Image: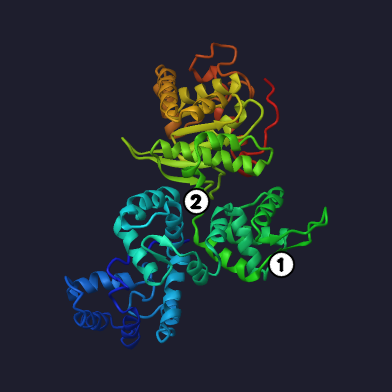
């Protein structure tokens, strides 16, 4: 996973990094001696001011250590990367390239370069736009600090990768080994496909799909649905990373990387990204209407990605933060986000690209996941309608728990596509509905939800309208279906990738 270095107290345009590496090498293991030698180095440069031995110990030494630039350990020894760099101090061009590649691949610089491409305007005056793009796209508040933006720019500009906040594509390819477009493809593949590609590289560039799946499961501790493996293979092949076997029905024929060198770099870049797929540029650059139109394709994978991007755009328009698409966890959650104003709230958005009405079973399943993950706001983004039974179950969940269920079906999405501001009116309307549903909520029901007491399991068979033979508005446990019993049966079931395969027609 990429880290984000705090390297403000080093400026390669002022400071001789090669000289600093020599200082560390000659005084390894003695932090005090290293700090004193760095101060003497700074004293020789008239451009350097405002520093003291104390600030060097507190800031400059910290900037050099593993969590930041990564050349020195806490006890004053060179890291493996530091030793590699020290071996290049006599070759300025290769030294700069090594520092730049390390920052791009290992220290979040890839995100910064992607930000330069997305904003694509010169000058430090655009740092605010770059910062907002990076913080939202990658869910990292580190980038909201403009000083961190400037620090990364100083290093990469010193290495020739960018100039005045514009990316040099040729130099990027020379340093990283792949062009920015290929790096973008690596960023956009799903976490599962990324892990399979990394396993394929470790296997020497050729291996059967079943062997790759077992290796990924062993290393990650997370099961992968074997029926989804072909889709992940096609995902990698469509981006030009691998070649799939052409003979049908073969489960043992090997996958092969197109270019071993490229695949190694792509796997390294992919591994540096977080467990969640970063937000696509489409979330920021395409309109809601464009994303909704993209869901009309018959290609299940493209439809699913478009709907996930649409859900992420909803989060972005609402001002939610830490937006994540398909975060790797014990449960497959399409999109999650956090609200910070006026109070902290976690959100989960489940995308259903179906041609038939959403039934009650998916609603119950997502309630179970939200309960296990302690998420209070559940949003369904659905390309079709919603059955009456599903709406009734959603009301019963809100009535008997501390959850709020919001449903954006085809009519709601169509209205938002015409005017994105409509989303606020939709949320206000559904929020008022949730308030009305919860008004008669009994204290015992909320306590049961919060402390996990056993609910009555005799409320009727799965699929009955909430309230059974009684009134749908009856909040008593005896009149309601056993939500928890259904959840226990359904929450553990794995669904196809992202829940994007069209569901069977509802029995309504």
Q: Position of residue 464 (x, y in %)?
A: 62, 20
Residue nearest the observer in this picture, 200 or 366: 200
Give above or below for 119 relative to 415. Answer: below
Q: Position of residue 382 (x, y in %)?
A: 57, 31
Q: Relative to residue 180, is residue 414 depicted above or below?
A: above
Q: Which mark is residue 206?
A: 1
Considering the numbered disc 1 on the image, is that residue within a helix, a strand or a loop?
A: strand
When asked about the image quadrant of residue 19, the answer is bottom left
In-front residue for pair 287/379: 287
Quadrant in which the C terminus is drawn: top right
Q: Which mark is residue 278?
A: 2
Q: Secondary structure at mark 2?
A: loop
Depth check, mark 1 against mark 2: the one in front is 2
Residue 295 x, y percent position in the rendering = 61, 36
**Visible residue check, residue 455:** no
Where's residue 277, x and y in %?
A: 52, 51
Left or right, 157 with respect to 418, comes to: left
The tag on residue 255 is: none
């Amino acid at each position: 996973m990429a880290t984000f270095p705090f390297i403000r107290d080093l400026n390669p345009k002022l400071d001789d990094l090669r000289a600093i590496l020599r200082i560390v090498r000659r005084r390894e293991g003695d932090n005090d001696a290293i700090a004193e030698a760095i101060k003497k180095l700074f004293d020789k440069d008239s451009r350097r001011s405002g520093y003291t031995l104390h600030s060097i110990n507190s800031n400059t030494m910290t900037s050099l250590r593993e969590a930041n630039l990564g050349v020195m350990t806490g006890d004053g020894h060179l890291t493996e990367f530091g030793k590699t760099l020290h071996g290049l101090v006599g070759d300025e061009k290769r030294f700069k390239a090594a520092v730049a590649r390390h920052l791009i691949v290992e220290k979040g610089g890839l995100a910064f370069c992607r930000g330069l491409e997305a904003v694509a305007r010169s000058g430090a005056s655009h740092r605010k736009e770059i910062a907002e793009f990076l913080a939202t796209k990658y869910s990292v508040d580190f980038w909201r600090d403009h000083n961190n933006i400037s620090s990364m720019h100083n290093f990469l500009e010193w290495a020739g990768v960018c100039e005045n906040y514009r990316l040099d594509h040729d130099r990027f390819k020379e340093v990283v080994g792949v062009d920015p477009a290929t790096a973008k493809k690596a960023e956009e593949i799903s976490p599962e496909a990324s892990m399979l590609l990394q396993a394929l590289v470790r296997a020497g560039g050729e291996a059967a799909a079943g062997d790759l799946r077992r290796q990924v499961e062993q290393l990650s501790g997370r099961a992968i649905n074997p029926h989804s493996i072909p889709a992940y293979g096609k995902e990698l092949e469509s981006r030009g990373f691998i070649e799939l076997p052409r003979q049908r029905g073969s489960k043992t024929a090997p996958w092969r990387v197109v270019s071993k060198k490229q695949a190694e770099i792509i796997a390294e870049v992919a591994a540096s990204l977080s467990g969640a797929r970063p937000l696509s540029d489409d979330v920021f650059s395409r309109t809601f209407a464009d994303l909704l139109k993209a869901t009309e394709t018959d290609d299940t994978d493209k439809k699913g990605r478009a709907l996930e991007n649409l859900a992420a755009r909803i989060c972005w328009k609402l001002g939610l933060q830490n937006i994540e698409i398909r975060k790797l966890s014990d449960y497959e959650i399409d999109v999650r986000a956090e609200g910070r104003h006026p109070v902290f709230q976690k959100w989960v958005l489940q995308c259903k690209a179906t041609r038939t009405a959403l039934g009650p079973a998916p609603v119950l399943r997502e309630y179970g996941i939200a309960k296990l993950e302690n998420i209070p706001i559940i949003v369904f983004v659905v390309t079709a309608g919603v059955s009456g039974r599903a709406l009734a179950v959603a009301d019963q969940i809100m009535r008997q728990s501390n959850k709020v269920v919001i449903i954006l079906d085809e009519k709601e999405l169509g209205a938002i596509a015409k005017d994105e501001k409509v989303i606020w009116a939709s949320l206000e309307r559904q929020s008022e509905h949730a308030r009305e549903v919860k008004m008669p909520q009994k204290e015992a029901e909320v306590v049961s939800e919060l402390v996990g007491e056993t609910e009555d399991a005799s409320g009727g068979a799965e699929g009955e309208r909430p309230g059974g033979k009684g009134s749908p508005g009856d909040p008593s446990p005896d009149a309601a279906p056993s939500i928890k019993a259904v959840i226990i049966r359904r929450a553990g079931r794995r669904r196809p990738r992202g829940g994007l395969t069209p569901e069977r027609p509802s029995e309504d």
